[in-house]
Image (spheres, rainbow, N blue to C red):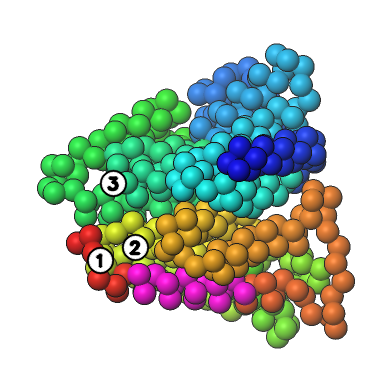
Amino acid sequence: MTLLRTAILALIAAALIIAFTNAPGTFDDYAFIAWAKFLLHPGPFAGYAQLSRVTDLDYPPIGITIMWATLKLGHHFAWPDLQSFKLPLVLTTLAAPAIAYTRTRAAEDALILLLIITPFGLILGYTDVTYLPFLLAAFYLAERKIFWAAGLSLALCAFIKWQPIIFAPIFLIAAYRHAPSPKHFAKLAAPTTIFVLAVLLLYNPATVIHVLLTATSDNEFSAQGVNLAWLLSALFEYFHLGGLTFQPNGTIALLTTPSPATAVNVAMTALRYVFYAVFLAHLIIYARGPRTSNAFLISATACAAAQFTFNTGVHENHFFVTLIAAFAAWQSKALDNFTLAACAAIALLNILFFYGFGDGFNFTNLANIDSTIFLALAELLTYALILHQQLQTCRAKSKAE
């Protein structure tokens, strides 16, 4: 039976790869290919600094280096640029379910993850999938209290794409709680610290910091992320605030600050401080709760969900880190089946409503009601479900204490 399940999984994976490797993806993919071509002559280290000077580069250095390496390999074998760009997405789409299988030895876990991530990577070309195997490894290593390796894996994720950095505080708290002394904690943190410093030196610390600040200084109110800011955008439009438009069919004129409407500036500042407060609250709940893997995983999920729900400048694919944390928590039974299914539905529908399968997706509104509003409401309620499960888990007495 195990061999049969493995064969079925392998055939489904092969079918997906063959079907979607040539999918056009989003317009961002062609910007990434242009970046990779820019690096072909100067190389990844000098080229990264040069690229940051001539573009509004907001991607971390290892992520850009992977794009450069695969394009260079593709040119050697005369592959089309899009296929070269998608090579690491294909490889990580295969590797991630395999790593998930090692956690539970359940073939259905691997299949579920494969189906969840295929629209992100193979179909739409989101580079989030590139760090996925390393993020899963970070969660699994932390679950087994191997924090020095978990930290390394998480740092690698963050240098591929910035979003996983949201988990850094909770990983630090977990490692500190595990360490018997500050000296032992320093030993746990040393490999990650050395790796981070090495990357900064290779790519120029000033350049990397500048790119990180560019990525985190996004002044869009809601960049097609169905969250609280998205709902407020619809509310602003309803009251006809000056300079704002919220259009049907899942599109919105991205609101920025400073805006003609004072309400947008006030709301943007308020939301950011709400996020800071809620995120800190999640960390405190975990720090005061049991030192169990379930408490760690559900708290990591809650932190990522808070970032997507309350922060501004959130894009449609930024729910991906919440989805992966939710998957890891679900595997450990810290998250229930419905909440994982809700997270998967929200993540997939968010990208479907805006990009379809790469060619756009036109849907008809009913009575001029935009369906993305309902999806945003569902996201808020799903965050509430995650919060409820974090509170339940972290209030429970741990048998491992």
The x, y position of residue 102, in whole percent, is 47, 41
For mark 3, give the secondary structure: loop
Q: Residue furthest bottom?
A: 239
Q: Residue furthest top?
A: 76
Determine if the magenta segment contains residue 385. Answer: yes
Query: Which residue position is annotated with label 3?
Result: 145
**Badge 2 amino acid:** Ala
Q: Label 2 vs label 1: CA separation? A: 9 Å
The reply to whether residue 88 is in sight is yes
For mark 1, give the secondary structure: loop
Q: Is residue 332 above or below residue 388?
A: above
**Badge 1 amino acid:** Ser
Q: Is residue 198 above or below residue 387?
A: above
At a point 56% along the width and 69% down the height, the residue shown is: 338
Q: Label 2 vs label 3: CA separation? A: 13 Å
Between 255 and 308, the residue placed more toward the observer is 308
Quadrant position of the C terminus in the picture? bottom left
Between 208 and 382, the residue placed more toward the observer is 382
- Where does the magenta region start and end? 378-393
Between 321 and 237, the residue placed more toward the observer is 321
Task: Please identify, in this view, whether the residue under mark 2 or under mark 1 is nearer the observer.
Answer: 1
The reply to whether residue 29 is in sight is no
Determine if the magenta segment contains residue 8. Answer: no
Q: Which mark is residue 398?
A: 1
Q: Which mark is residue 295?
A: 2
Between 261 and 204, the residue placed more toward the observer is 204
- Pick whichever of labels 1 and 3 is earlier in the sequence: 3
Q: Label 1 vs label 3: CA separation? A: 16 Å
For mark 2, give the secondary structure: helix
